[in-house]
Amino acid sequence: MNSWRNHITRLEGAYAQKTIDSYSNDFARFAGWCRKKRFKCLPATPETVARYIDEIAVDLKVSTVKRRLCAIRKLHHLAGHRGITDDETVLLAVRRAKRSKPGRPRQALGVTAERRDRMLAVCRDDPRGLRDRLLLAVGFDTLCRRSELVAIRVQDLTRNGNGTYSVLVRRAKNDQEGLGRTAHLSSNASRLIDFWLEQTGLTNGPLLRPVYRSSPGNRSLCAASVGRILKDLARQADFDEEEANRVTGHSLRVGAAQSLTKRGVGILPIMSAGGWKSMAVVARYVENVEMNLWD
C-alpha cells in the first residue's frame, strides 16, 4: 500500500466516508500526475503543486481545482508537512486559476412552488409516480440536499397533533457532529406520505426508494437519481430546454428558499429551515428572486 494511502486510513471515524473517498480520489490524481512527471508527491514542493494547478485549471472548474488542492493540503498535514500549500507560489497559481475563468458559478434552476406544482401534475398514477410526487413534496418542504433527502427513513417521521409530520434530517455535510435538524412537512406532503406507506406497506427503512416492476426496492434511492428524476419531470412539464438543463438535485432546495423569500420570510429563518451556516450562500440563491419567480 502506498504510504499516502496509509495516512488516508487515519481519517476513518473522524470524517464521513464520502469525504474520505473524495480526499483519496483527488490525491490519487495528483499522485498519478506526479508519477508521470517524475515529481515527488509527498512531500511535494510548492513549485510542483503550483505547476499541477496551472495544468488542471485549463480544463477544470475553479471549484474542482480548489477541492483537489484541499486534498493535497490534507495529506501533507497528515504526513506532518505543513505550509507547503500555503506557500505564495501555490497561492498565486490559485489566483491565476480564478482569473482565467471569471464569472460566477452557474446556479441550479430553483424549483419554486409554481414549478413544483407543474411537475407534480405530470407525475404518473403508478408507484413510481407516487414516489416522484413524494420526492417533490418532501424535498421542497424540508429544503434538503439530495443526500439528506434520500437518507430520510420512515423511523425519522413523527406525527404531529394536527396530522402533519415532522422529519429528522440527519447528518449533513456541514453537520459533522451529526446533530441533525427537524423539518416540518405540509399537509399535502403528509398525505402523500400516508398514501405511500399505505400502498407500499413500509414501516421502517428508507422512505424514498427505487421502484422495480411497481414495487419499491430494499434500498434507498441513489442521490444521483434525484437530479435525473427532477430533470425528466421538468421536461414532461414543458419547461423550456434552457430551464430543464439547469434543473439539478439541488433545485428543490434553491426553489424553496426563493419561494420563502417571496412570501416575506427573512434570511435567518430560511437559513434555519434549510440548515445553512453561511448567509452568503442563501443570499446568492435569493438575490434575483423576483426575476426567477415573476413572469
Image: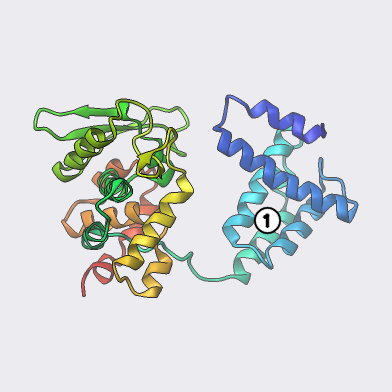
Residue 284 seen in the current view:
no
- The residue at the point 28 percent across, 49 percent down is 126
Judged left or right of residue 73, residue 217 is: left
Identify the residue shown where x is 68% and y is 56%. 91
Q: Residue at x 22, y 51 (%)?
A: 266
Which quadrant is home to the N terminus? top right
Q: Residues within 10 Å of mark 1 (few under 14, many from 20)?
A: some
Residue at position x 27%, y 47% in the image: 130
Tell which of 63 and 5 is nearer to you: 5
Instruction: From the viewer's side, name the closer residue of 154 and 47.
Output: 154
**Residue 33: horizontal and vertical position, in percent?**
80, 53
Give residue 83's quadrant in the image: top right
Front residue (pair 64, 90)? 64
The amino acid beneath tag 1 is Leu
What SS does tag 1 mark? helix
The residue pinned by badge 1 equals 91
In the image, residue 130 sits, relative to residue 75, either above or below, namely below
Q: Position of residue 205 (x, y in %)?
A: 37, 28
